[in-house]
Image (cartoon, grey):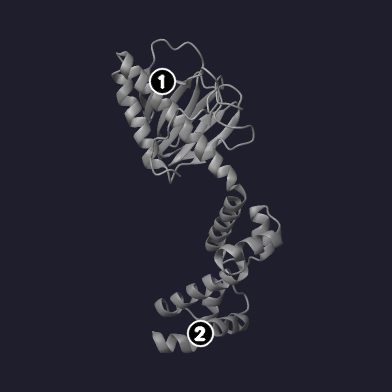
Amino acid sequence: MESHPYPDARQGIFELHARPRLASIRHVRGGRDRTSDSPDFRQSPAFLVFVISGRGKAVVNEKTYALSEDQVLLIPAKATKSFTTDPAAPLEFWQIGIADLAIKGLPKGTFQQPGEDSLLSARETRRILLSYVRILYEFQKRSDGAHMCEAIGDLVASLVTFLRHELEERASHAPEMQDYHLGVRAKEYIDAHFREDISLKTIAKALNVNVYYLSHTFKTLVGHSPIQYMIHRRMTEAQNLLLTTDATITEIAIRCGYNNTNYFQVAFNRLVGMPPGKYRKTWK
């Protein structure tokens, strides 16, 4: 990513004589919004939705997207859309309408190639996006002169250029990012289910991936196979229970996912260097 937060909007990503315009900008918080629309707006714009906090859903052309903090949803022009919010965690988001969007090599009114993700994580670019939307909102309230309108146009073009840069960067790293997210999902699954009777096949089925691909990817990213990682999580939990509870060795074995106490003790001794009973007597 470039160190400067605002890319040069004159780098030629737009069609000849095409210039995106700000059609509207809305700050929606808990069902209420402040709206600023361009007075000469005449066409259905494309939209950028930047979620600040909360949870909810968006339905775009009958496709549902789960929304949460630090996500960006890109909506093409003329799309039907609706939003619902979780009452327990109301959505707060900015919605920016962009008219006359014509990027070279893309269908008019769209931000991305067909097949590219419409829902993106903005965790690493939150600060930059917040700067864009806040400045745009303030500029739009003062758009009563030619110079201010030109500044708004430049900022909108810069924002779209920044988004295209992000999309292209993600596409170039798609395979490694896919592996990374699989590793994270597998780790989260094991963390949540290591107390249960699970196997490599169980994990692969839950994540809908090939067993061998999962094992290879996980070991590359974490340094252990999924089963080795699960055993480490179980033994860490067993050590904690041995020192903080009066539960029997059998009870602890069951609580850590082992139906066979002897197998649990062998695994504990192999990893920790002493049997569970001796570990408790030594350290409690």
**Residue 206 percent across, percent down from the top left:** 64, 55
- At horizontal 57% and vertical 84% (from top left) the residue drawn is 270
Indicate the amino acid at tag 1: Ser
Residue 23 vertical position relative to residue 158 in the rendered view, above or below: above
Above or below for 60 versus 147 = below
Instruction: Say if 134 sits above or below 187 in the image.
Output: above
Pointer 2 residue = 276
At mark 1, the secondary structure is strand
Judge by depth and name the residue closer to the eye, 88 or 149.
Answer: 149
Callout 1 environment at 10 Å: few (<14), some (14 to 19), or many (20+)?
many
140 relative position to 40: left or right: left
Going by the image, does 146 lie left or right of 11? left
Q: Residue at horizontal 48%, vertical 72%?
A: 237
Q: Where is residue 268 in the image (x, y as percent from the top left)?
A: 55, 81
Picture coordinates of residue 247, whole percent (x, y): 47, 78
Residue 258 at x, y percent in the picture: 60, 74
